[in-house]
Amino acid sequence: MNGFVYIIESPSKHDLLHGRVEGRALSEAFNLARIPFWYSLASDREMLAEALSSHLVDACSHQHPLVPILHFSLHGDENNVGLTGV
């Protein structure tokens, strides 16, 4: 495999209340399958920006020379993505 899966998750408050966190489940599955991954939780715009900048850079340096494959686990509609804290 030439890449690693970079998961960015922002579950809704209802998902959090009921323990539904897809990104964590994906992390467990990737770990069992020995697929390299990195997990980020983005609760608001500031954290999403950090996940897509400095945290992604950190992930890339730890997973070098693998390239990131971005996986977004978010809610949204045709106009916006929904973040936990928004």
Image (cartoon, rainbow, N blue to C red):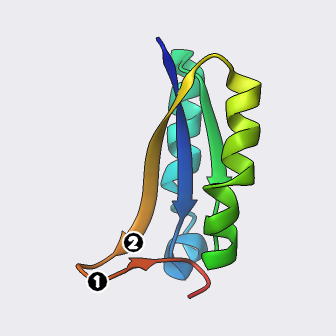
What residue is pinned by disc 2? Answer: 75
**Residue 44, horizontal then vertical, whole percent:** 63, 78
**Residue 43, horizontal then vertical, whole percent:** 64, 73
Secondary structure under the numbered disc 1 in the rendered image: loop
Label 2, label 1: how many angstroms apart (C-alpha)?
11 Å
Identify the amino acid type marked 2. Answer: His
| Vertical placement of residue 44 versus 41, above or below | below
Picture residue at 52% right of the left edge, 77% below the top: 83
Q: Is residue 84 visible?
A: yes
Picture residue at 44% right of the left edge, 79% below the top: 82
Quarter of the image holding residue 75? bottom left
Quarter of the image holding residue 74? bottom left
Q: Nearer the viewer, residue 65 or 4?
A: 65
**Residue 76, horizontal then vertical, whole percent:** 35, 76
* Tag 2–tag 1 contact (CB < 8 Å): no
State left or right for residue 43 relative to residue 11: right
Picture residue at 57% right of the left edge, 78% below the top: 84
Mark sitting on residue 79: 1
Question: Residue farthest to the bottom?
Answer: 86
Q: Is residue 44 visible?
A: no
